[in-house]
């Protein structure tokens, strides 16, 4: 197409126009030819963005063999939008959680539960969109591919801040799979949450112990079922609570990590949220690589560090409060045992 226009120009115009005009037109034609594909893609992307077609943006940019820094930023933001957890959404959630806690802090002996409030909002979002965790992981991958983490997106938010927001949201999404966070805020007890807490306490605190008794106020015993491997990569841990019922969780074959699960498979292989007193098999959220350590602990720490680079002092302060709520020894690093202790502390107050 470019050659055709150039040839027509030579035959019909060159003899009648001066050399300067020729050079200008040729320069314009070749510039248009070289940028046509890029410009067309940018136009398509912007049109899809204006129409909130985030799936379209994801499909277009994921199909490219290589992406520019701005395209990775756009792709990461598209995944965040698809998860309904944009940076603006998260900032509002964080701020609102803090305000809700402070509004009735004087009425409760223990009021440091703003992270639980934030987690409940994330949990509500997951119920409406089960692909949230997958989208957030893709957002993290996209933002991580931008070499210059000080690069700004079209809303002037730095890549490191966007990455931190995606990591924090991803970790909090993983946290919400442990049980019903809402019950923490209603002074209630969610036994699924307690079972997760007991499994975490056993595996990350006493990995070399097959049977652990009286691990917490609500856990009578937890037992790693060595002879009941589900496959080569995982096995079960049986948790007995003070309510007289038993619950199962999955752990990695080496016994060093708790695998993220959501509900159960019954004896017929049907999905259910009934533990059936330890009979039903826990259902993996994704695969055995998605563990408490990788999906929650590491991501939470990295997310907090990245998002603390925010220039918005209010949001940065609230993130710091979140970390202090969970970081029992104030070391600046949250570990799995502290996640378990945080759950217990919330239930006991």
Image: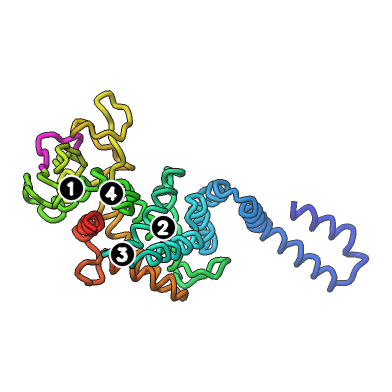
Q: Quadrant of the C terminus?
A: bottom left
Residue 166 higher or lower than 270, as above or below = below
Q: Are marks 2 and 3 in contact (CB under 8 Å)?
A: no
Disc 4/disc 2 C-alpha distance (Å): 34 Å
Q: Are marks 4 and 3 in contact (CB under 8 Å)?
A: no
State the residue position of label 3: 111
| Dot in front, 3 or 1 | 3
- Foreground residue among 76 and 23: 76
Disc 4/disc 1 C-alpha distance (Å): 20 Å
User: Splitting the image into 4 quarters, where does residue 348 fall?
Assistant: bottom left
Residue that extends furthest to the front in the rendered view of this protein: 107
State the residue position of label 2: 140
> Could you tell which of marks 4 and 2 lies nearer the N-terminus?
2
| Dot in front, 2 or 3 | 3
**Residue 100 drawn in magenta:** no
| Residue under the image location 10 percent in, 42 percent down | 223
State the residue position of label 4: 188
State the residue position of label 1: 199
Disc 2/disc 3 C-alpha distance (Å): 32 Å
């Amino acid at each position: 197409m470019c050659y055709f226009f150039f040839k027509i120009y030579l035959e019909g115009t060159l003899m009648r126009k001066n050399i300067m005009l020729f050079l200008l037109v040729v320069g314009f034609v070749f510039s248009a030819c070289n940028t046509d594909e890029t410009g067309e893609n940018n136009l398509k992307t912007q049109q899809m963005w204006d129409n909130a077609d985030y799936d379209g943006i994801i499909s277009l940019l994921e199909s490219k063999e290589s992406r520019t820094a701005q395209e990775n930023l756009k792709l990461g933001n598209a995944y965040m939008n698809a998860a309904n957890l944009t940076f603006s959404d998260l900032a509002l959630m964080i701020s609102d959680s803090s305000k809700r806690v402070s509004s009735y802090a004087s009425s409760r002996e223990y009021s440091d539960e703003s992270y639980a409030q934030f987690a409940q909002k994330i949990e509500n979002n997951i119920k409406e969109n089960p692909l949230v965790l997958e989208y957030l992981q893709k957002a993290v991958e996209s933002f991580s591919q931008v070499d210059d983490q000080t690069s700004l997106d079209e809303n002037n938010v730095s890549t490191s801040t966007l990455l931190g927001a995606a990591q924090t949201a991803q970790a909090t999404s993983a946290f919400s799979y442990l049980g019903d966070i809402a019950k923490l805020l209603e002074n209630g007890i969610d036994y699924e949450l307690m079972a997760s807490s007991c499994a975490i306490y056993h595996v990350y605190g006493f990995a070399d112990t097959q049977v652990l008794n009286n691990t917490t106020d609500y856990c009578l015993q937890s037992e790693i079922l060595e002879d009941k491997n589900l496959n080569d990569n995982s096995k079960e841990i049986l948790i007995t609570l003070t309510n007289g019922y038993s619950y199962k969780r999955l752990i990695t074959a080496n016994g060093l990590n708790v695998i993220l699960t959501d509900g159960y498979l019954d004896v017929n292989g049907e999905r259910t949220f009934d533990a059936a007193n330890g009979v039903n098999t826990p259902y993996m959220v994704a695969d055995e690589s998605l563990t408490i350590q990788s999906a929650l602990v590491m991501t939470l720490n990295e997310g907090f560090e990245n998002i603390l680079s925010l220039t918005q002092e209010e949001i940065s302060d609230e993130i710091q409060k979140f970390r202090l709520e969970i970081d029992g020894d104030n070391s600046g690093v949250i570990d799995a045992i502290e996640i378990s202790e945080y759950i217990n502390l919330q239930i006991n107050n």
